[in-house]
Image: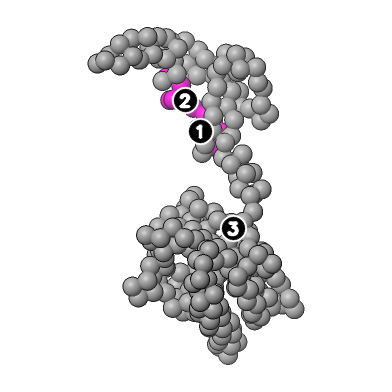
Amino acid sequence: MHRVAGHEEVVGKDVALAHRLLKNGVAEATGWRGYALFSDQALQRLGIDPEGLFRGSETYDLGIVETASVDLDERYQGFVDARRVFVAPEAADVTLVRRVAASPAVTWEWLNDPDRRRRWEDLVVEPQALPGGRSGVGEVSYCLRGSDVRVMTVLDWRPFDYFTVQSTRPPSVDATLTSYALKSVDDQTELQVTVALPDKGLRRRRVRQSTETTLGLSLDRLAGAIADEILVGASEPPNR
């Protein structure tokens, strides 16, 4: 221990080595984006030997250190895949079903593409965070309709099966959960939308009715917009 400016700090060769290990070649050797690195000595002290370790060594001015690393990104993805967030119809305050004249893949794109959402949902979508640079769990968007601003966060993402988003209206922390489930039926898509509203006491019934009406109109516009696009595409002459 060493006292610096009134504070005690841990010093010594082991501390210096820990700082050296922050600069290592694991990412270059494995392509991993997130990982945990252990010295062999640390693993022996802990008495553990996890599966899937990448063995290597690092050379510093303090000597050669034998290391073992584990891919945390793979484990995180496993946790994400195992964690499902879905509003089941029996737990929903609002359940709406529409038949859409397109495949689940096409319908999925219409549900999530910002420009297409503006055509049927009458709002402006501004993505704020895209983990990994693409849509998925953790994506955050601002949805603007006039002076109404909502923050949408993706909680579950299973293309082209279903996805679930959380909606809040700052500064309120009350959250609405909405799941969009897609099922292929006769070359079309059966779209089921389920909504779980926050507990708002006496306002709950009014909010439920308003949500059902607004969402129903939006889904009708969605089905109509997709049908119109398919009709226009069918009427265009083939390229020669």
Q: Tell me which residue sits at (68%, 75%) in the image.
A: 190
Kindly identify which residue carries mark 3.
157
For residue 49, above or below residue 108: above
Describe the element under mark 1 as helix, strand or loop: helix
Q: Kindly identify which residue carries mark 2.
A: 24
Q: Which residues are magenta?
A: 20-32
Q: Position of residue 120 (x, y in %)?
A: 49, 79
Image location of residue 46, percent across then percent down: 61, 17
| Residue contact at pointers 3 and 2, CB within 8 angstroms | no
Observer-nearest residue: 109 or 221? Answer: 221
Read off the residue under disc 1: 27
Q: Is residue 49 left or right of residue 29?
A: right
Measure the C-alpha gap from mark 1 to mark 3. 27 Å
Residue 179 is tagged as: none
Question: Quadrant of residue 111 in the image?
Answer: bottom right
Against 40, is 172 above or below?
Answer: below
Give the residue type at disc 1. Ala
Instruction: Label 2, secondary structure: give it.
Output: loop
Label 1 with label 2: CB-CB less than 8 Å: yes
Label 3: few (<14), some (14–19) or many (≥20) C-alpha neighbours in 10 Å: many
Distance between the alpha carbons at the discs numbered 3 and 2? 34 Å
Among numbered discs 3 and 2, the one appearing first in the sequence: 2
Residue 175 visible somewhere in the drawing: yes
Name the residue located 63 percent from the left edge and 60 percent from the top edge: 86
- In which quadrant of the rendered image does the C terminus lie? bottom right
Q: Secondary structure at mark 3?
A: strand
Q: Amino acid at mark 3?
A: Trp
Question: For the N terminus, which image quadrant?
Answer: top left
